[in-house]
Amino acid sequence: MNQEQFIARHQANWERLEDLLAAGRGRPAQADAPPVDPGEFPRLYREACHHLALARARLYSQPLIERLDDLVLRGHQRLYQSRSGLAGRMLRFAAADFPATVRREWRALLLACLLFYGPFFGMLVTVQFAPEFVYTVLDGWTVVNMESMYDPENHERLGREREADSDVLMFGYYIRNNTSIGFQTFAGGLVFGLGTLFYLIYNGLVIGAVAGHLTHIGYIETFWGFVAGHSAMELTAIVISGAAGLKLAAGLVRPGRKSRLRALLDNGRVAVTLVFGAATMFFIAAFIEAFWSSIAATPVTIKWGVGIALWVLVIAYFLFLGRRRAA
């Protein structure tokens, strides 16, 4: 069956499902609309899921796949929204919707990874052979401040110099700092992706320069011991924020057969899912950074062990959770 025959056979059911979804958002039903059968919506939703799988397997056009994907997403939200409260929806988002969306947007995620980790590892390695290279992205005061923050003689607290009197207030500081980076990287997609490209590369260079310099001068245990715990959450959240920004940019740069506004709105729904998940990861990273990473008395081997375990958990989370949702 070719695509035209496929559309002609199922178009009426898709339009009926769209009508039911629209009516659920408060739009009044048309006078000549057929009466609603309680079992109709679940049946049409299951059919749309099946049709989406067929469209992907048969490599039908991207606009058709996106239309069916949008129907399935809205149908899924409607079906389960009526069965659970806020806590259930949040749990479902964390356990299925967010990891499934990240996997589905793997192209944007891969590009964001290259733009961030390329400059990061490039600068990290370069500074080992040319230490003065750190000053191409950091000024002298910042370098001295970083050395003070991770000085092995510091036996009280590691990390940023305390601008607050307690871990709780530092927790708030880290949340503000992390969300600022994430928002800049995400919102930069609205200028045709230029802002997202800049912030991904810039943050990769700066973080790589700091890591490279402190490694070169021998502050390995204090620096890597500090960042190990929250790095999985924080760095992954930066990359996902970048992927969300690139998704916005794709709607503006490559709208396909849609108008730019329509493509931006459609891509924006996906981007919001990504950035909401990234914000949650930034929140967790700030908690770890304030209450765990900064403790200088904990043996560094334990910190490295915790850091490795969290990286494994984050990778497993995005690889395995929500697979039924993505199918």
Image (tube, helix red, strand yellow):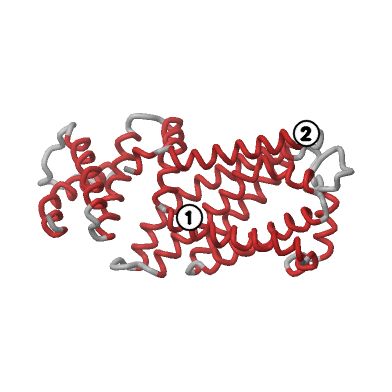
* Horizontal arrangement in the rendering, residue 114 relative to residue 51 (left or right): right
Pointer 2 with pointer 1, Cβ within 8 A: no
- Count of labels shown? 2
As drawn, 11 above or below 156 = below
- Residue at 50 percent across and 67 percent down: it is 193
Quarter of the image with the C terminus is top left
Q: Amino acid at mark 2?
A: Pro
Circle 1 packing at 10 Å, graded few (<14), some (14-19), many (20+), is many
Q: Amino acid at mark 1?
A: Leu
- Residue at 61 percent across and 47 percent down: it is 234
Q: Which mark is residue 299?
A: 2
Q: Which mark is residue 109?
A: 1
Circle 2 packing at 10 Å, graded few (<14), some (14-19), many (20+), is few
N-term-proximal mark, 2 vs 1: 1
Rendering quarter of residue 135: bottom right
- Residue at 12 percent across and 45 percent down: it is 33
Quarter of the image with the N terminus is bottom left
Q: Nearer the viewer, residue 254 or 22?
A: 254
Q: Residue furthest right?
A: 153
Rendering quarter of residue 325: top left
Report whether residue 244 is seen: no
